[in-house]
Amino acid sequence: MPDKNFDILIIGSGLAGFALALHLAQRKKICIITKLVAESSASAWAQGGIAAALSSDDSPANHVQDTLNAGAGLCDERMTRYVAEHAAIAIHWLINQGVGFTGDRHNETGYHLTQEGGHSMRRIFHSGDATGKAIQQALICKIREHSNITMLENHIAIDLITNDKLSDHTRSTQRRCFGAYVLDKKQDKVMTLTAQNTALATGGASKVYLYTTNPDTATGDGIAMGWRAGCQIANMEFIQFHPTCLYHPHAKSFLISEAVRGEGGILKLPNGARFMPQHDSRAELAPRDIVARAIDFEMKKRGLDCVYLDISHKPANFLKAHFPTIHARCLELGIDITKEPIPVVPAAHYTCGGIVTDQRGRTGLSNLYAIGETAYTGLHGANRLASNSLLECVVFAQAAAEDINNRPGLDLPALPDWDESRVTDADEEIVIAHNWDELRRFMWNYVGIVRTTKRLQRAQRRIELLHEEINEYYTNFRVTSDLLELRNLVDSANLIVQSALQRHESRGLHFSKDYPDILPVAQNTVLQKTIK
């Protein structure tokens, strides 16, 4: 690739990154980098759908209220209203890109709408039970055929290039982002990519936990890079644990969609007894944080390995039509959902916090944007409402694209090449594997669904030790993909624990036994690193 200078460098290949690229492609020269292949993002794993109030008996105001209720007092109402009011535009844009949502000729919208936990109405547009995959496949076709878009697969960003990395005479008073150092994993070489604007769209950090519904790529890369570059990070304590991840030794990270409960699925104990009505009047349709805590409570109280989600009372043809992916995957593992319940456990699913941005996706670092799960926009508050995540990606991608198109061009300085003059090849890569496993286990045990101050402090001490080890390793050896991901995971874990220790209450997804009450005034947890 001879040209390493772009108008926009997009780090990440999920819905947020792809939508941004397609909105800019007519006027800008774009580079997208992705750690594996274009199809491997967390967006492609999304089953449920995308929320939008398009029915005549629904309204954006209803959607806003449901989002505020789920967010437990911490949603930014202005941002929430902006997203809900732009939801129809987002849906129509996706349809115009070739996304085939499941139709229903009896519905006034022409599409089958489902309902999920926390929603007061049926407003979820979906494509069977593989909505994310359908969206990503449609957008990938558009991305690959566009001459202005360069896709670099098997590349991982190392760090953003800011003023701090420039020589003294090229530094300016205003801190800016000029691109990124990127490791070509196949060639094992570090590239310097220069860009007028850079966008972080790398998804969340759920891989910091032992059990997660996310792909292996969800290692908090964008959040960690933004943190190291001096961006503000907000509300990282709010990690959403999806209540229903398939519990099976051979079912790695397989999600049982929220829509299964939306269509009548019932949570049961091994003896067949229903338990959700004892925890919340909304039962299985309560928001995710409530359902996840209820399952966690029942499992710990009774010493269970899992609970069961039963939708076998629905007609078999209905289940096969609405949940073909779930039905097929469960059947492969010997579970027939038309006849028996599905064993499920909670698992880390979504990072509600992230890099603080404004309504245009702009961070506090000039010429750097963050969109999707990487960003903190204020939409999700203390708990994300189901199916608002894909919507957020599309809405803020369009907003960021408008801002980028209106920005004047920069005279970019010459950027220094990556310096490998004082490093050698790693001698014991087992250190990385061991630290990766240790981190994810103690985060699950100490910083999970229910927390205590003592557990958080234990996690903090271990993170400090890991941080020292990894920094020493990073300083002395050539970078590898595994090392970079571990470095980002440790930074993300540190942000989660720091944020959790600062919140002296229980709100939304953060539940502390030491501070079980909710404070009368809701406040965000905002962290910022001092850049010397």
Image (tube, grey):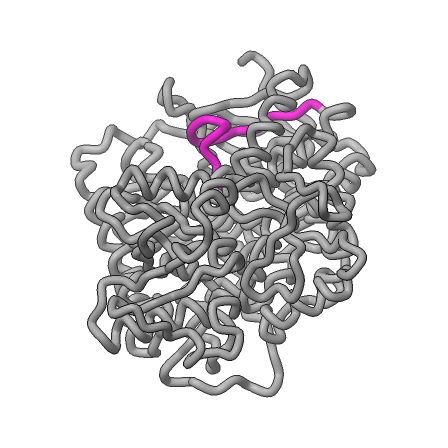
Query: Which stretch is magenta?
Result: 29-42
Identify the residue at horizontal 56%, vertical 33% (top origin). 134
Q: Position of residue 107 (x, y in %)?
A: 72, 48
Identify the residue at horizontal 63%, vertical 72% (top origin). 69
Identify the residue at horizontal 74%, vertical 37% (top origin). 93
**Residue extending furthest top?**
2
Q: Is residue 80 magenta?
A: no
Decide: is 2 above or below 402: above
Q: Quadrant of residue 161?
A: top right
Identify the residue at horizontal 42%, vertical 24% (top origin). 184
Decide: is 115 above or below 516: above
* Front-lying residue, 329 or 471: 329
Q: Is residue 33 magenta?
A: yes
Q: Position of residue 336 (x, y in %)?
A: 32, 46
* Front-lying residue, 20 or 273: 273
Q: Is residue 393 left or right of residue 345?
A: right
